[in-house]
Image (spheres, coloured by chain):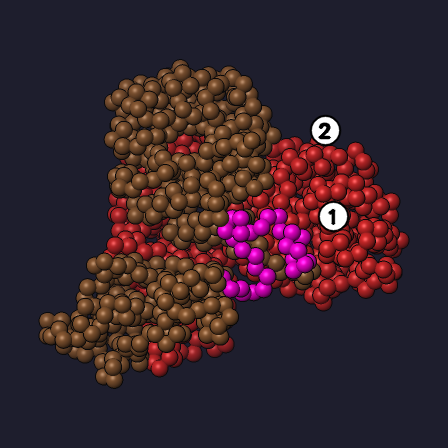
Chain colours: A red, B brown
């Protein structure tokens, strides 16, 4: 019999404490809908007592009929005051949520140092506040802040706080490792003790300061916790919250628990990438389960084994979480990598075929010049498709020019491009805050009238690497450009002794790849006006 | 009594399997010296049997007197062949290392599917290869690939492989979770079983596919393993290897083991950042222990509690790992470093002096803009000398212009500079094979008549780094330029959203530093002729 677990997502609340993460009410709405589609049980939307953006979110989300419960977050009442007069608690009530989480102290040191009140008053604050929610018909969760640190210093007080929360009718006791400093063994031991002492169901909320948030969540579940709190991609303050994108597949695929409804797990990778796009945070390629490199294989021996049987070097089938296998091509690897990449694209390759030999030679030659395709699948795909006559020439570059001028401290950067798009010459110019930005602007400006969908893609990463450092400025540089559309990410490469030329090559390939893959025909009939900025072409 | 553990770093070998990571022999040398300073016990340098770059590394590292043992990596001999005729094993012997790791199969499925040989032959391969190392006086480590998967499928065979490795005299049995799919509880149980069955000391080598590599390493140590293998920043294939930057402080600060010599732990953050710079991989701000946000506090409540007592929201004192607390947006990064640098230059600084406060403010502001002086002492020295009125203005830039033009495939790059050198205006132009090269050529051409010694210096390294990847081509870049004269090497930095401007800034600083330090007076009387290429100025 499979045990059901409850997934509590706090991306929209604790996740936004992460450095550089800021979500508008509209962003929150989009993410909430995506989380609901994934099948999480609770979506913590924010703190209605702390900012108007969150109040707007709670208001707007009411229009949607979600499966997930939207929850609000707040603190226990202020010391020596009345719960039903507490502004923060009243805001939660007014937000119209059916469930809410209240954070309160369970570490005596914090009661003295941070709250600066008595141990008794803190317990009263917890009791009154939870009782207020229950009295108003709101499902109540008690977030016991610093519970594990508190328990280690004064177990009796920490347990007494929980007991009072239970007495107030809390629906969940959520044990928080707020500073992220606890080890899995300690978590297991302490959660086990709480289970023997209390009856309310237990939740676990961990942080990643020791790179143990996932392990700590699993340890708590094994000790009897039934709710896991975390965020998509592990966003959160300092080192982040527990990453639901790793916790859910670990629990569901490896430990036999039920977290998400049937068939929803395969939405995980798409959800993770969507949230990273909306939050405008670059997703590490190596992120477990959902990263672009999570099932990427580089070494030649690995690849030849993978082709014999995927289980040799994959701990799960990537499709289970909506990800996919990628074969990376690198100097270390043999031609089997390229063949399997071509097969993935449905091209007719095998080691004995003449065309295959030619393309192998070409790739070997390019690698010798400094190209590296392991981080640039899209460039490799273009090369392979071209070799097999399957890449239509969507445009050709006749010339480009790039000018940077600094006179008396004033900097001006402009790019001029001349393209041939299906027989028509387009000649235009654009400025930018740097040479690559100017080239990118000019290229898009020249193409947008033919391919309006180009507006949906943007550059999401740009890397420059000097290949042979001995020669310094006369050395070659390799530029990697990552482009992103709403549901896809691809990388292209350019190499030259001239950083501008290398950037241009990678930019052009990034756009060509997009146009080949996003279907250009359905875009052609969109009218183009001067508003698109095409005045000068 | 504190238990000593052995730290085995494989950043230079398994780490380079990470997507986008490629290290030259020179890079490897720099990282090895840094790892040695940190105090790790083994540094795996690479695979002398697979590429010439690694052979060069093993040759060059011999010139250094390291505390750490440099180790080579390779595979067990090929099936049905002789160990002493195996090319890979012979390369290890020839590399001159005193310790080596051999990877071999311990999962019966892999023996059949990947190796395509018999279970008996695989065991013979393991035995012969390790015996070959021992016979040649090389300390031998056996990397039991996929040991945990192998044990779960066929424990008797997996143990039989280890037994044979032990019989061959292996010094360590390293148990690998190659696919990264094993859970901490399983690791603990299986390592415990191995301990009861075998006598050789046990190492643990995990991967992060379930976001559990750190927890798995700790679980193995708790079950009796005595060596941990991992990489700096967790670099490695797919989702990475176990991250030593988290494992070491967890073991040493929280679990009471000895990993690094006294006082070395505080080098951890510096080492992590150095390796990330050399590998040209952006370090996530939230990386546990060593990330820039690992001890950053954002929330108002957190901050006021932190000011009352750091322990309220910090699981360790950040200084223990060489990191620091950050409260506001910006902080005085390394104020003591700056003071000691200034004192080194003989400048009159102390924290109470008004001029010192001003220069601190200026540096804080520059760091906020993206400058980083850790890798650019020469720029820092120029800043400090200027602030104290000790940097004579040897020339000023009136304007520069840089043009890259590609027409029908022909590329032309030229730079035009206008300088004022001691009241005289110099206006000249030069070509280059790239924009930085052209700017460098033009700058030198303008100055060589005044400072002929400029011919003795050249650019020896050029690095570009995108600082904030969110905005891609509109983001800022930081350029580091290393210049070299006969007996000196110095680095300068430039920051701009425009890579050309950032490069120009670093180039100009590199030359200014040289001119201030190499004594300009003794150069002025050297005659300048047209051979110097000054026709056009």
Residue B274 position within the rendered picture, expressed as x and y whole percent measured from the top left = 41, 52
Above or below, B212 relative to A308: below
Residue A131 position within the rendered picture, expressed as x and y whole percent measured from the top left = 87, 52
Q: Residue at x 72, y 43 (%)?
A: A153
Residue A381 position within the rendered picture, expressed as x and y whole percent measured from the top left = 38, 49
Residue carrying label 2: A1
In this view of the protein, which residue sits in the foreground, A309 or A348? A309
Above or below, A233 relative to A90: above
**Chain letter of disc 2 in the image:** A
Q: Residue at x 68, y 61 (%)?
A: B304
Number of numbered tags placed on the structure image: 2
**Disc nearer the start of the sequence (2/1):** 2
Q: Is residue A421 visible?
A: no
In this view of the protein, which residue sits in the foreground, B173 or B464? B173
> Looking at the image, do the residues carrying marks 2 and 1 touch, with CB atoms under 8 Å apart?
no
Q: Is residue B45 visible?
A: yes
What is the quadrant of the N terminus of chain B in the image?
A: top right
When asked about the image quadrant of residue B411, the answer is bottom left
Q: Residue at x 56, y 27 (%)?
A: B223
What is the quadrant of the C terminus of chain B in the image?
A: bottom left
The span shown in magenta is B305-333
Indicate left or right for A443 with B3 as reference: left
Q: Residue furthest right?
A: A135
Number of other residues with Cα within 10 Å of mark 1, as a class: few under 14, some 14 to 19, many 20 or more: many
Q: Nearer the viewer, mark 2 or mark 1?
A: 1
**Chain letter of disc 1 in the image:** A
Indicate left or right for A351 with A84 as reference: left
Number of other residues with Cα within 10 Å of mark 2, as a class: few under 14, some 14 to 19, many 20 or more: few
Q: Secondary structure at mark 2?
A: loop
Main SS of the magenta part reads loop
Whether residue B359 is in magenta: the answer is no
Residue carrying label 1: A107
């Amino acid at each position: 019999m499979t045990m059901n677990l409850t997934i509590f997502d706090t991306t929209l609340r604790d996740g936004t404490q992460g450095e550089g993460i800021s979500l508008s009410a509209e962003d929150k709405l989009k993410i909430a809908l995506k989380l609901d589609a994934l099948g999480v049980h609770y979506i913590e939307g924010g703190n209605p007592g702390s900012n108007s953006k969150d109040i707007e979110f709670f208001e707007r989300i009411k229009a949607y009929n979600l499966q997930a419960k939207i929850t609000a977050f707040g603190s226990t009442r202020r010391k020596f005051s009345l719960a039903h007069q507490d502004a923060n608690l009243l805001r939660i009530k007014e937000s119209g949520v059916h469930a809410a989480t209240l954070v309160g102290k369970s570490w005596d040191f914090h009661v003295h140092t941070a709250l600066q009140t008595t141990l008794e008053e803190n317990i009263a604050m917890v009791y009154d506040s939870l009782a207020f929610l229950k009295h108003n018909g709101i499902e109540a969760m008690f977030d016991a802040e610093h519970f594990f640190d508190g328990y280690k210093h004064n177990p009796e007080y920490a347990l007494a706080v929980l007991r009072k929360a239970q007495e107030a009718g809390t629906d969940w006791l959520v044990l928080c490792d707020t500073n992220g400093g606890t080890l899995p063994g300690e978590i297991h031991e302490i959660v086990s003790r709480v289970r023997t002492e209390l009856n309310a169901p237990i939740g676990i909320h961990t942080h990643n300061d020791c790179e143990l948030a996932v392990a700590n969540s699993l340890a708590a579940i094994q000790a009897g916790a039934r709710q896991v709190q975390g965020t998509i991609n592990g966003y959160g303050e300092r080192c982040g919250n527990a990453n639901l994108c790793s916790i859910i597949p670990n629990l569901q695929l490896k430990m036999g628990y039920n977290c998400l409804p049937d068939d929803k797990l395969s939405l995980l990778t798409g959800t993770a990438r969507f949230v990273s796009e909306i939050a405008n945070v670059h997703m590490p390629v190596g992120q477990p389960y959902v990263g672009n490199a999570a099932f990427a294989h580089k070494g030649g021996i690995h690849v030849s084994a993978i082709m014999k049987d995927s289980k040799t070097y994959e701990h799960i089938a990537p499709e289970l979480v909506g990800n996919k296998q990628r074969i990376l091509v690198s100097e270390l690897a043999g031609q089997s990598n390229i063949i399997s990449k071509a097969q993935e694209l449905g091209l007719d390759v095998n080691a004995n075929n003449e065309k295959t030999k030619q393309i192998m030679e070409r790739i070997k030659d390019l690698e010798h010049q400094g190209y590296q395709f392991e981080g640039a699948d899209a460039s490799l795909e273009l090369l392979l498709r071209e070799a097999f006559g399957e890449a239509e020439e969507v445009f050709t570059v006749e010339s480009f020019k790039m000018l940077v001028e600094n006179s008396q401290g004033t900097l001006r950067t402009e790019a001029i491009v001349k393209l041939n798009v299906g027989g028509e010459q387009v000649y235009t110019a654009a400025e930018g805050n740097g040479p690559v930005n100017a080239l990118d602007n000019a290229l898009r400006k020249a193409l947008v009238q033919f391919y309006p969908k180009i507006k949906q893609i943007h550059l999401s990463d740009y890397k420059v690497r000097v290949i042979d450092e001995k020669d310094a400025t006369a050395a070659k540089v390799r530029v990697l450009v990552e482009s992103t559309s709403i549901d896809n990410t691809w990388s292209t490469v350019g190499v030259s002794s001239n950083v501008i030329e290398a950037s241009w090559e990678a930019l052009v390939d990034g756009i060509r790849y997009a146009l080949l893959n996003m279907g250009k025909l359905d875009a052609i009939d969109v009218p183009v006006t001067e508003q698109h900025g095409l005045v000068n072409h």
